[in-house]
Amino acid sequence: MKQTTRKRIGKKSFIVFFAIVILLSTVVETMICRGGSEWLYMVLMWIPAAAAVVANCISFRENKERFSLKKLFAKGGFRKCKLRYVLLGCLLPLLYLLIPYMVFWQIYPENFAYHGVSLAVILKDLLPILVVGIFISLLSALGEEIGWRGFMVPALYERVGLNKTLLISSLFWCCWHLPLLVGGGYMSGTPLWYQLPAFVLCIFPVGVMAGLLTIKSGSVWPAAFLHAAHNNYDQAVFDIITAGANKMYYVSETGVLTILCAWVLAAILYSWVKKEVRRL
């Protein structure tokens, strides 16, 4: 993704995006924390997409461009990219989630639902869910990614460069989740004093990886598949087959092992993309 002297996303559309996200998310997250229905999570995850659509429509006027649906989709990050970036988006969460879970299963084998079961049986049971579940999870994850990596990352990147873009976008994404943790409706299992910093330390490098894939590929799809794969692997597969009152200290989105693996992979990906960006 090359930087240009003319800003593709104007100041007004940039402000409108954050205003809509903050205002609507505050309302919906408050409803969720007060015991609202499960479908509100889907609404919440599509707020960034709605904000991005409105902001991109405003950007047509700011740039004095003629409106077209094709351009609107392109502004939202729906561009072709090499398949390897999408596959990498699916592989990275598998690495930083599965490795910690495997370590936890070795330490506490009794907490692994498939303890003593052959690998063939495990793969037969879980592989279809690991693959198909990504596409199901994409229905919600894409809503966030159209906003975060389809709009926010490119808008920041053309203004402040790579490092500040990764810092700001990842921190904003982390903070966007925090009211749900405080309200007790998300990632429970540890005390709040531990849960909040651990969650940020875990999700921040995930945001960095999603941002790097977006910048490298020029498309929202790799980040969307990374997000969908992350949610599917952790919430629909590994968490379900893992017991233990202390597991959230080791694995998932607040586990120390997950934090370490995510930071290592983010650092490796950053080093690779940083070299490529310098060549542009």
Image: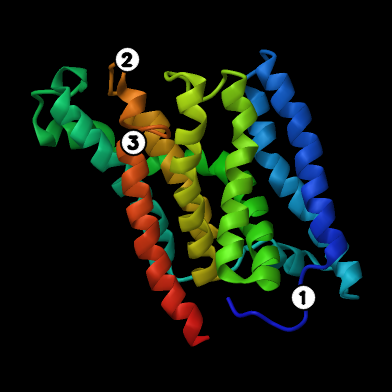
**SS class, disc 1:** loop
> Which residue was labeled with disc 1?
7
In the picture shown, does residue 256 fall above or below 249?
below
Q: What is the C-alpha distance between the residues marked 3 and 1?
A: 40 Å
Q: Residue at x 61, y 26 (%)?
A: 180
**Circle 2: residue type:** Ala
Residue 54 at what x, y percent from top left?
82, 53
Query: Is the residue under label 1 in contact with that under label 3 (CB below 8 Å)?
Result: no
Q: What is the C-alpha distance between the residues marked 3 and 2?
A: 15 Å
| Closer mark to the observer between disc 3 and disc 2 | 3
Q: Residue at x 51, y 51 (%)?
A: 207
Q: What is the C-alpha distance between the residues marked 2 and 1?
A: 50 Å
> Which residue was labeled with disc 3?
256
**Circle 1: residue type:** Lys
Q: Is residue 81 left or right of residue 39?
A: left
Asked whether residue 124 appears in the rendered view, the answer is: no
Q: Is residue 6 left or right of residue 154?
A: right
